[in-house]
Amino acid sequence: MISWKQPASWALVIASALIMAAPAQCEVSSPPSIEGTYVLIQSIPEVNMEAREFTKDLFFPHQKIHFADLGVMEEEGYDVFQGQDQLILTIYPPFPMAMCRQERWKYDCQNNGTYIPFEPIKQEMGANVDTPLDDEMEDLAPVLKSRNSKTKQKDIIRYGMTFFDKSGGYLMFAIDKDTLVNQTFQYDPNVPDNADASERMITTLQIFKRIPDDPKPPQNKSPVPSKDE
């Protein structure tokens, strides 16, 4: 039994009781970074490569991309992008000629719109990070079903990306740490070109899988010999 004449012991007991009674603090885990290299493995439905035009945010079979994640933009001067994640998207060659029929890339094309120079294309953008909306989950259902995925809505990360020049962007979902799904549209080839846009558009889901990043070139740390040697 602890006596009131032992204040130090009594204080220790009270402190211990308060610690035991305090609610447990759960660690808040931040979502995994989107940073990495991905390749397009499937589109649902597949991209009609014979289409006369393509929406800006449509990727093409086997395209390889890379995201660099520069973190949250907190500094002043980012306008509407302040507080968003700053991303740099790199699209790697080879580029299909179909990209020249996209409004976004036609200015990169040469030789009367027949090819894009064999250099990676970089695009800087801001991204709002959130969970998918209910109707977006309905759109994602075919992908989740085909993969027998049990991923819950709260565990999917929604990236609403906007290019810094505000010319467009992408809507992507990380359904797990290695899989991104781009939600976009393509034009139905069976609907006349002069039909209303809403009648021509087909919702398209494009599945990207993470692949190993390209190895960095070896660093030659040995000093360069002088001409006198």
Image (spheres, rainbow, N blue to C red):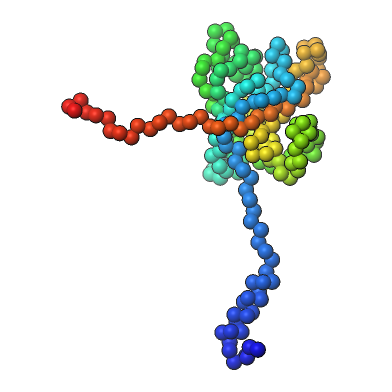
How many numbered marks, from 0 up? Answer: 0
- Tell which of 15 and 87 is nearer to you: 15
- The image quadrant where one finds the C terminus is top left
From this view, report whether residue 3 is shown above or below residue 222: below
Q: Is residue 7 visible?
A: yes
Q: Nearer the viewer, residue 1 or 49?
A: 1
Relative side of 39 to 146, left or right: left
Horizontal and vertical percent position of residue 102:
65, 17
Q: Is residue 59 above or below residue 178?
A: above
Foreground of the two, 134 or 217: 217
**Of all residues shown, which one is farthest toward the front?**
148
Residue 99, x across and y down, in percent: 62, 17
Q: In this rendering, is residue 53 above or below 215?
A: above
Residue 126: give x, y in percent of width and height: 60, 36
Most extreme residue toward the top is: 112
Residue at figure coordinates x 64%, y 53% from the top left: 28
In the image: residue 58, left or right of residue 165: right
Give the quarter of the image for residue 79: top right
Left or right, 40 with respect to 195, comes to left
Q: Residue 91 occupies which quadrant of the picture? A: top right
Residue plotted at (65% across, 89% down): 1
